[in-house]
């Protein structure tokens, strides 16, 4: 166990003296007080591996420390440790709660296996949530990590938080697709004066703040606005057509009334060019005029 070194061994002894468990979580390490005040060999082995970094301590303990009554226990321990290491790798900085770590520290491997499987299920849901949120440009909330790291028993509550967040991000994604997709003319007309994008943005902010109910409500508002836009656009187009028809009818009626009010024009006979109504040239020839006094009586 030369890889442990003096500094790490001091940390191992310090943790053993305080009866701290080897599997660290986000808060201060939990303790496992023993009735006789001593340190159990299993606790010390975990400290050597998890705190000291020993790689072959299990082999040494299996050969020199493990009592015959516990034969086969080391294989279960090794399998549980591998599962826990995989869990830490999948966590990417998320540390499992005491509900996962305490069964490992007490070598309750059946309970530990169940809790590790629940924790893995939570992390799988977390990855789906983060992937979908990232594709939408939305920040994932912190509630799930807090629940994961604070769990002291089973992870049913944490799984419920994850399922709730997944449902919420799915609602936001549906609303996002409805808002950004190409809209037909009726939908575009129906959306005039509305702001589905603003509702969608509000859904993202609520989700990031951990307000799942508010986020789903805002996403629903955006989706409802888009869904109702087609019918609203058709109503607006019908109204515009009706108004244009009324306007055209009014114009036609006004034009007809103006024509009826105009006087009828007189018929004028055509005259030869250059003549006036009183010209002698255009009048019938008249008999020459004579003074009746100058006429002599017939003989």
Image (cartoon, helix red, strand yellow):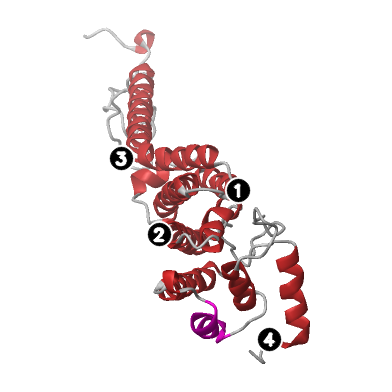
Quadrant of residue 297 in the image?
top left
Separation of marks 4 and 3 at Cα, in angstroms? 135 Å
Separation of marks 3 and 2 at Cα, in angstroms? 128 Å
The foreground one among 267 and 272 is 267
Query: Are the residues flagged by discs 4 and 1 in contact, CB closer than 8 Å?
Result: no
> What residue is pinned by disc 3?
272
| 4 or 3: tag closer to the N-terminus | 4
Farthest residue to the bottom: give it: 2
Q: Secondary structure at mark 2?
A: helix
Separation of marks 4 and 2 at Cα, in angstroms? 29 Å
| Disc number placed over residue 4 in the picture, else none | 4
Residue 19 vs 187, above or below: the answer is below
Residue 72 vs 166, above or below: the answer is below
Across and down, in percent, residue 101 comes to 55, 60
| Quadrant for the C terminus in the image | top left
Query: Are the residues flagged by discs 4 and 2 in contact, CB closer than 8 Å?
Result: no
| 3 or 2: tag closer to the N-terminus | 2
Reply yes or no: does residue 125 show up in magenta: no
Residue 261 vs 39, above or below: the answer is above
Q: Residues within 10 Å of mark 3 (few under 14, many from 20)?
A: few
> What residue is pinned by disc 1?
205
Query: Are the residues flagged by discs 1 and 3 in contact, CB closer than 8 Å?
Result: no
The foreground one among 37 and 85 is 37
Q: Which residue is located at x 37 percent, y 24 percent?
A: 250
Across and down, in percent, residue 109 comes to 44, 62
| 4 or 1: tag closer to the N-terminus | 4
> What residue is pinned by disc 2?
110
Mark 3 or mark 2, whichever is nearer to me: 2
Q: Secondary structure at mark 1?
A: helix
Separation of marks 2 and 1 at Cα, in angstroms? 41 Å
Q: Secondary structure at mark 4?
A: loop
Examine the rendering and report whether any part of residue 76 can be seen: no
């Amino acid at each position: 166990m030369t890889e442990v070194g003096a500094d790490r061994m001091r940390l191992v002894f310090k943790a053993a003296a305080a009866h701290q468990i080897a599997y660290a979580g986000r808060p201060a390490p939990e303790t496992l007080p023993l009735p006789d005040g001593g340190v159990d060999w299993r606790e010390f082995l975990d400290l050597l591996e998890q705190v000291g970094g020993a790689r072959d301590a299990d082999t040494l303990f299996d050969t020199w420390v493990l009592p015959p009554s516990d034969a086969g226990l080391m294989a279960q321990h090794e399998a549980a440790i591998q599962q826990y290491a995989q869990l830490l790798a999948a966590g990417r900085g998320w540390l499992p709660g005491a509900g996962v770590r305490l069964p490992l520290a007490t070598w309750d491997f059946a309970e530990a296996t169940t809790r590790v499987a629940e924790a893995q299920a939570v992390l799988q849901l977390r990855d789906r949530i983060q992937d979908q949120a990232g594709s939408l440009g939305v920040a994932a909330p912190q509630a799930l990590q807090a629940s994961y790291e604070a769990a002291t028993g089973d992870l049913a509550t944490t799984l419920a938080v994850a399922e709730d967040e997944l449902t919420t991000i799915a609602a936001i994604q549906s609303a996002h697709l409805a808002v950004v997709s190409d809209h037909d003319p009726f939908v575009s007309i129906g959306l005039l004066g509305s702001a589905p994008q603003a509702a969608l943005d509000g859904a993202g902010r609520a989700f990031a703040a951990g307000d799942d109910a508010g986020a789903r409500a805002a996403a629903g508002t955006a989706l409802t606005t888009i869904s109702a836009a087609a019918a609203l656009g058709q109503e607006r187009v019908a109204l515009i057509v009706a108004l244009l028809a009324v306007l055209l009818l009014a114009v036609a009626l006004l034009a007809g009334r103006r024509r009826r009010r105009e006087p009828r024009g007189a018929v004028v006979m055509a005259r030869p060019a250059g003549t006036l109504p009183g010209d002698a040239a255009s009048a019938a020839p008249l008999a020459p005029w004579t003074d009746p006094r100058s006429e002599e009586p017939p003989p």
